[in-house]
Amino acid sequence: MAMISTARPPVAGLSQRFSVLIVLVALAALLFGVERFGSRILVSLLAQAIIVSALAFGVGLLIRVSGLVSFGHAAPFGLGAYGTVYALSGAAPLPPEIGLPLVVMFVTLVFFLIGLVISRLEGVAFSMLTLALGQAAFVAATKFRSLTGGGDGVIIDMPRQLYGVHADVLQSPYGMFVVGVALLTLVYFALSIAECTQLGRLAVAIRENEERVRFLGYRTRVLKAGVFAVSASLAALGGVLFALYQGFVSPEILHWSFSGSALIMAILGGTSALWGPVAGAFAFFFLKDGLADVTTHWLAVLGITLILVTIAWPSGISGAVQFLLARVPALFAKGKGR
Amino acid sequence: MSALFRCVDIGKQYGGLVALQGISLSLEVGRVHGLIGPNGAGKSTFIDVVSGRTPGTGHVYLDDRDITRVPLSERRRMGVSRSFQRTSIFPALTIREQLDIAAHGAGGGHTGELTDMLGLADVLDARAEEVSYGQQRLVDLALALVGNPRVLLLDEPAAGLSVAESQTLAAHLEEVAARWKVAVLLVEHDMDVVFRVCHVLTVLASGRWLVAGPPDEVRSDPAVIGAYFGSAA
C-alpha cells in the first residue's frame, strides 16, 4: 500500500496544460490511425481497454483526490453493467436513452451513501472495507439467479438503436472505441475544470490535512463521500459500456481480482495526472496481450513490471511524461544558448 | 470584564495516566491568557480537549452557551479557532487558495488586511511548500485568524522560529488581541513571547493547576520556579 504513489497533483501548471494538449493530439491521432491502419485484433484490444479504463479512471481519481485505495470498484462497474441489463429489458419503465443515465446516477447515489459511512476510515481499513463490499456484491450476483442469471450470466436484449446509433455500431470494436474515447474525454475535461474550482481545491486540502479542514469549518465527510461517489460513477459508466459492447453480463466482473486489475492500471499509469490511469489501462492491455503471445506466465511478468514501476517510478506513466515535459523548455533554452 | 470563553473542570485520562485534572480558566476579549508549564504538564492536551480535537471531561462555554459537544466545523463558524503545535497547512495549495478556503469555511471574511499584517502579501501565489518555515508558521496563524474569530487557541505558535521571527509573531499577537478584540489562549515555551504578550498566566504541572495570575507574580512564584527547575530551586 505504501508503494502506491499518492503524490500531490499539481493544482494547475504548465506541465498540466501541456498534458491536456498532448492528450487531445494523441486522441485525434489515435482515432485516425486506428480507423485507417488498425487491425481487427488491435481495435478489439483498444475497445476493451477504453471500457476498462473508465474503471481505472475511477480508481485513480479516488487515489488522486482522496488518497484512498479501493479494492472494490468492480462493484459499481458490475452494478452499472447489471443496471444496463435492466434498463434495456422490457421490464424497465423508462426508455433506454433515459434509463442508462439513470443507472449511472443510481450507482452514484448508492455509493455516495456508502461513502458517507466508509469515508470515515483511512488507509488499510478503508481498502479492506471496499474489498469486503465488492466481494459482497460478487456473492450477491452469484446467488440471486432470478435477477442476475447467477454464474451463467445474462444476455442483454439489445434494442435496434440507442441514441440514434445502431446497436451494431456500439457492439463493433471501433464504434465502442470512438464512443468510449468521446465519453472519457468529456469526463476528463469536466474533472479538470472541477479540480480548478474551490471545491476541487478543498478536496486537495482534505487529502493533505483533513483535520485542519474540519477545524476551518467544513464537514469533510460529505465531500469525501462525494469524491467516492464520482469515482464510482466512472466505474459505473465503464460497466454500462461493457454491457452494451459485450451484450452479456456475468458475476465475474464483480470479482475482487477485477478491482485489483483496475488498481494495477491506476498504479501503472500513475495518478499525478488525471489521464494517468487511462494510460495505465491501455498499457495493461497491450502488455497483457503482448506477454500472452510470448509466455503463459504473463501474469508473473506483469507482476514484476508492476514492482519495477512502483520502485523505480512510483508516479507511473503520467509522472514520467510530466517529468519529461517539465524538462522540455529547459532543453530548448539550452539549445538556444549554444 | 466578563469571560467570553470558559473552560470548566477540564480533565483527560489515558488509561491509568491522568494527563489533566480539573483545570478551569477563562478567556476575555482583547486579552491574551498564557498557559505554561514544563514538558508533559498537559498544555497541548488542554487545548486539544477544549478545541474538541480530543475527547475529555468538563465543559466549555462560549458566551455562556455550552459548546462541549458542538462539532468542530460548527465551532469554527461560531468563532472558535485554533492553530497547531506542528505546522498544519496545505503544502500543495497556494497561500491565497488556502486562505480562500479558510475564509469560506469561517463563513466569510477578507484576507487582505490579514496578509498585509502578517507580511504574506508578496507570497500569496506561492505554494505553501515553497515558502520558508517562518512564513509557513505565519500561514498557519493566518488560517486560524481568517474570518475574524472571537476566540483563538494557539498551540506553540513560535515553535521553530528564530528569535527575530518570534518577536515579530509576538507583535502580531498583541495587535490581534487588542485591535481585533480576540480572546487568545497561548500555549508557548518561548518565555520572551509569553511575558511580552500575556495579560494573565496559568501554570500547569503534571496535568494539575499550579498557580495563576499576572505574569510578574507568576514569574516569582516559588511553586512555578520549583516546577520548572525542581524543588531544590
Image: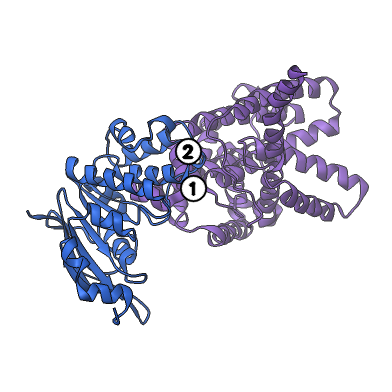
Chain colours: A purple, B blue
Instruction: Give the residue furthest to the left.
Output: B1
Please state which amino acid type lies under the numbered disc 1.
Answer: Glu
Q: Position of residue A95 (x, y in %)?
A: 52, 31
Please state which amino acid type lies under the numbered disc 2.
Answer: Leu
In-image side of A206 versus A300 (left or right): left
Give whichever of A128, B21 is nearer the camera. Answer: B21
Looking at the image, which residue is at 22% across and 42% down? B175
Q: How far apart are the alpha carbons under marks 2 and 1?
A: 9 Å
Give the chain of mark 2: B
In-image side of A12 versus B21 (left or right): right
- State the SS at label 1: helix
| Label 1 crowd (10 A; few <14 / some 14-19 / many >=20) | many
Q: Position of residue A314 (x, y in %)?
A: 69, 47
Give whichever of A148, A288 is nearer the camera. Answer: A288
Q: Is there a contact, CB below 8 Å, between mark 2 and mark 1? A: yes
| Label 2 crowd (10 A; few <14 / some 14-19 / many >=20) | many
Give whichever of A328, A225 is nearer the camera. Answer: A328
Q: Which mark is residue B93?
A: 2
For the question of whether residue B143 can be seen, the reply is yes
Q: Position of residue A326 (x, y in %)?
A: 67, 30
Q: Say above or below: A51 vs B80.
A: above
- Toward which corner of the image does residue A187 lie, by quadrant? top right
Give the chain of mark 1: A
For the question of whether residue B7 can be seen, the reply is no
Image quarter in which the C terminus of chain A is found: top right
Image quarter in which the N terminus of chain A is found: bottom right
- State the SS at label 2: loop
Instruction: Give the residue furthest to the right.
Output: A294
* Residue to which mark 1 is pinned: A208
Looking at the image, which residue is at 87% across and 55% down? A297
